[in-house]
Amino acid sequence: EVQLVETGGGLIQPGGSLRLSCAASGFTVSSDYMTWVRQAPGKGLEWVSGIYRGGSTYYADSVKGRFTVSRDNSKNTLFLQMNSLTAEDTAVYYCARLDSSGYYYFDYWGQGTLVTVSS
Amino acid sequence: QSALTQPRSVSGSPGQSVTISCTGISSDGSGYKYVSWYQEHPGKAPKVMIYDVSKRPSGVPDRFSGSKSGNTASLTISGLQAEDEADYYCCSNAGSYTFLFGGGTKLTVL
């Protein structure tokens, strides 16, 4: 059974850094495209970042230069390193998998981890 | 990365049909083909309902259908049920492996 579990969220001061983790089971993160999607309180979904099986990375303009997506194949875990955080980064962060058959939709999602940027 | 525009809210009575639009879909490139729709209930992770504009994943009722005309994609839910009340988001591939979500539409079943 495919499962994604995010951890690492919490309260962080503006300008601070945080690293989110997404532990995967039931499949191999290095074999698929993995992504981070966030949802600010009361707002809609926003695609944040992704990493392709070959290692290529992709970012939304809003986080480019501040966030870094990576993975640890030995731990089957996806990461999101977030630097220079601002209040606008406050959101629930979900990790998700792009359909493994190659279709462009996210078939499995974690339950999310809340990041609150506030002084 | 331009935004995809959805109506903030739609509503319908049980048994009726509703359509949610998503405007701003690229008219060329992969965004034209790779439109998906997600259902989100409060406190739950999103669930895909439609992909590749009009395909339904296994397990999604055939009351849900998708279409596209020009730069607007649409999700139609027929035979509305109380459990369909949720937020709905369109998503388009925005080039390579980047993606764009719509602002979301709150569906109320009256």
Image (cartoon, coloured by chain):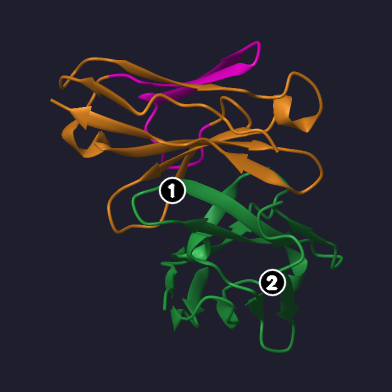
Chain colours: A green, B orange
Q: Residue at x 72, y 62 (%)?
A: A32
Q: Which residue ends up furthest to the top in the rendered image?
A: B69
Residue A105 falls in image quadrant: top right
Q: Residue at x 76, y 67 (%)?
A: A31
Whole-number angstrom distance, CA of label 2 to CA of label 1:
20 Å
Q: Residue at x 56, y 35 (%)?
A: B36
Residue B105 falls in image quadrant: top left
Closer-to-camera residue (B3/A27):
B3
Mark 1 Cα within 10 Å, few/some/many (few <14, many 20+)? some
In the rendered structure, the residue with mark 1 lies on which chain? B
> Quadrant of the image for the C terminus of chain A?
bottom left
Q: Position of residue A71 (x, y in %)?
A: 72, 78
Q: Residue at x 69, y 52 (%)?
A: A60
What residue would you read off at disc 1?
A: B47
The mark found on residue A77 in the picture is: none
Q: Which residue ends up furthest to the left in the rendered image?
A: B110
Callout 1, which amino acid? Lys
Q: Position of residue A13 (x, y in %)?
A: 48, 80
In the image, is B42 to the left or to the right of A99?
A: left
Q: Examine the structure image and report whether residue A108 is included in the region drawn in magenta.
A: no
Up-down relation of residue B79 to residue B45 (above or below): above
In the image, is A75 to the left or to the right of B88?
A: right
| Res. A33 in view | no
- Span shown in magenta: B56-78
What residue would you read off at disc 2?
A: A29
Secondary structure under the numbered disc 2 in the rendered image: helix
